[in-house]
Amino acid sequence: MVAEARRLGFHAIGIAPAEPSRRAHAFETWLDSGMHGDMTYLADPVQRAMRVDLRTLLAGARSVVVVGVAHDSGVVPAERLRGQVARYARARDYHSIIKARLRRLADEIGRLVGRPVASRPCVDTAPVLEREVAERAGLGFIGKNTLLIAPGIGSYLLLGELILDVELEPSTVAGTERNRCGSCTACLDACPTGAFVGPYVLDARRCISYLTVEHRGPIPRELRPIIGTRIFGCDVCQEVCPFNAAAPSRTAPDPSLALTLRAAERSAPDLVRTLGLGAAQMRQLVRGTPLRRAGRDGLLRNVCVALGNTGEPAVIPALARALRGDRSALVRGHAAWALGRLGARAVLEAARDDDPSVTEEISAALGGLTAP
């Protein structure tokens, strides 16, 4: 089975028994504290029950095979007028790719055990506490940045799970998992927005990845300047991790995830051009990539913030057009903030908008400007 998993392209594979979560209390405490923000699906009673016991996802579940696929961890040179995109999102959308491989793996397991097996393939959209299960399966350990770190691969890893009604021998003995972070706090110290409450506890409401991908409303004003030119996700807590320093040179990323169409533009989009894209052009930009997750309005909201943080007066006309004519009040409001950050008083003073949220953003932007 392991050989077949490797042949299918999985860089890491492990097996754990299908059993209730050992960290259910920590998960429930995190939810009760509200640190999940707008991700209300996490607090849904049905999903909560599923996440703390993956046996609810498949009748008769006995084992779970956990796999990992390394994605590209290369650095895209930063340019002031180009947006920064998290590494995993610079590639093809991995969900369908990993699920298809898991289905083929289930067929192989059925062949090996001599009967059809009941199975459920899962990626990160399924209600599974996947990092905990991956740790129990021996793929690695959960670091202080809350990410799974696989020795030899690092944390630039996409996870998948195959829940089975077959009892397979676990990869590790229960209770042998060991965290290797030691006294290192590089990830906690480097987080731009201070999103870590402490080791192993992330307040999503301050996390740039959450704010630019999952969050659907206005980004808190006090956090906007800190986001810089990041328009989708953030890798800072991974970039500073010692386990990621040499791992990429030892594990080549999965080539099937590589983008072949407009790869450079999706890896570091031109901010001004992106803000001016029509509906069809926007669909083409995000098609087949994780960028779709943010939605059109969310992505352009992020682009406005990034443009405001460039410090470049040359981008003012593009932001002015967005303030005057974008269909989304969310985008117009963040364009107003960006114009204020760039000192475009005349543009803001001339602006008129029927949406109260945009009017308030304009007033706040003007209020933050130094008197002429």
Image (cartoon, grey):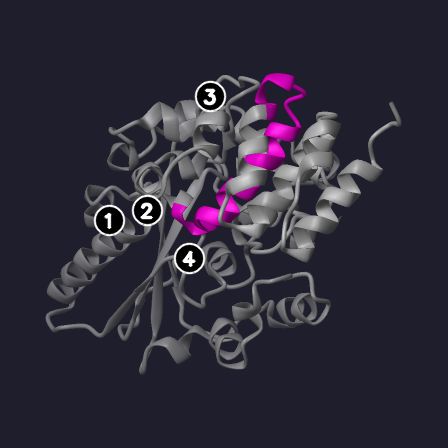
The image shows residue 337, relative to residue 210, as above or below, that is: above
Badge 2 marks a residue whose secondary structure is loop
From the image, give the main secondary structure of the stretch colored magenta. Answer: helix
Q: Earlier in the sequence, mark 2 or mark 1?
A: 1
The image shows residue 304, relative to residue 332, as above or below, that is: above
Q: Which residue is mark 4?
A: 124
Badge 3 marks a residue whose secondary structure is loop
The answer to whether residue 200 of the structure is visible from this angle is no
Give the amino acid at mark 1.
Ala
Label 3 vs label 1: CA separation? 30 Å
First to last magenta residue range: 292-316
Q: Earlier in the sequence, mark 3 or mark 1?
A: 1
Label 1 vs label 4: CA separation? 19 Å
Q: Which residue is mark 1?
A: 5
Give the amino acid at mark 4.
Asp
Q: Which residue is mark 3?
A: 76
Q: Residues within 10 Å of mark 2 (few under 14, many from 20)?
A: many
- Of residue 205 and residue 173, the one placed in the foreground of this image is 205
Image x and y of residue 120, in percent: 28, 69
Magenta stretch holds residue 315? yes
Label 4 vs label 2: CA separation? 10 Å
Q: Quadrant of residue 303?
A: top right
- Of residue 350 and residue 170, the one placed in the foreground of this image is 350
- State the residue at coordinates (24%, 36%): 256
Give the amino acid at mark 2.
Tyr
Image x and y of residue 370, in percent: 87, 27
Q: Earlier in the sequence, mark 4 or mark 2?
A: 2
Q: Residue 94 bears which disc, if any?
A: 2
Q: Earlier in the sequence, mark 3 or mark 4?
A: 3
Label 2 vs label 1: CA separation? 16 Å
Quarter placement of the N terminus: bottom left
